[in-house]
Amino acid sequence: MRWQAPLTRRRLFQALIGWLSLRPLLSEVSLPGGENWIGGRLRGFKRSATASRRYRIDATILICGAPVFTRKGVGEAYASIESGASDGATAVALQFAAGCWPERAAGLNRFGILREAAIEDQDGNTEYVFAGLITTSKEESLGEARKSLAASNTGTPLTVARGIIREGRATAWTGHIEVPREFRWTDAAAMLGKTLGPEQALAPREIAVDHAPTFLAAMRNAAVQSQSSRRFPFLHNGKLYRLDVQRGRGSARELASVIWNSLGAKAAEFRTSYRTGDQSGLPEFIDYRPKSFLRLSLHAEQDATHNQIPSIFTEEV
């Protein structure tokens, strides 16, 4: 079976397009759970269905909120959702990865990936597992962005995060590494399972989350449910947030979303739209403004012929 076909001012951008890069001296040893943090947890589950979507990323420079320059194809992205089963348990795996092409983005080589899995046992209990590569982006103005370009000859600092939500509590590990500029976003999935070993990890952060899912799971829930407005608590990078979603008045397939942090401050705003009749929950279009001077538009490509999107599952039917 195959479907034809989920994503904070700064926080969402880190997960969505992550301004990051990686270094070959990373340890091969990962935290408990195996080298592949999510794939190892899904070992024994056989994938039965999948949907995926690829995107072209266009960037628009803004001055005082007005667009002054747009460049198409500065980067690319992909999103996927997979489902599988094992001995009465079911699993749904979600991923989003994105990055820019340096030759199209004034030399910038920034990218990121976020992977999640929701595993439901025979008794209806759900466990969430997540992992991601996340970069920091300190530029708050166009001038600072230009300075960062001039100083981008060295490696880029990267934050790696992974964790698990089980029985209403979340445990998350984070670590910091540096990677070379030559690394490309298309290799991030293969690298994700190797980037956070015990010698790089900080002490685990634990937090009570009740029934809050992970971020991509919350986004997909918002997309496939029919309510005109909803609030979804979710966990991202070991911290609790709230997603407020308003369905468009003119189209049931359009969502306007706002993310709030645990202190009640607005963290991000973005818009997504979905294909009519598509129940995968994968957006067809994403409009996001990570900085006051930058707007990113992700357009689904109809006839993408790029490299195969990597599966999170280790086994297929």
Image (tube, helix red, strand yellow):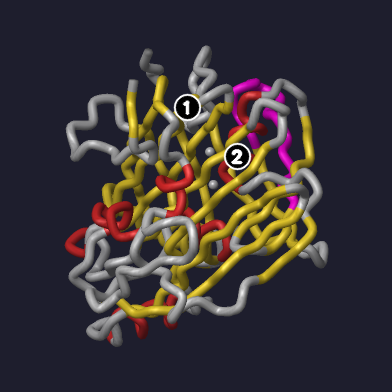
Residue in front for this viewpoint, 38 or 13:
38
Residue extent of the magenta highlight:
242-255
- The outermost residue toward the front is 87
Amino acid type, mark 2: Ala
User: Where residue 255 appears, x then y in whole percent?
Assistant: 63, 34
Image position of 182 (left or right of 198):
left
The vertical placement of 4 against 189, above or below, is: above
User: Where residue 106 appears, x then y in whole percent?
Assistant: 24, 68
Name the image quarter holding residue 44. Answer: top left
Query: How much space separates mark 2 and mark 1, taking CA atoms?
Result: 13 Å
Amino acid type, mark 1: Ser
Which residue lies at the image location 59% right of the left edge and 34% below the top edge? 220
Q: Residues within 10 Å of mark 1 (few under 14, many from 20)?
A: many
**Quarter of the figure with the C terminus:** top left
Task: Identify the mark at residue 143; answer none if there is no mark.
Answer: none
Residue in front for this viewpoint, 251 or 168:
168
Which residue lies at the image location 23% right of the left edge and 61% below the top edge? 184
Q: Is residue 279 visible?
A: yes
The residue that disc 2 covers is 217
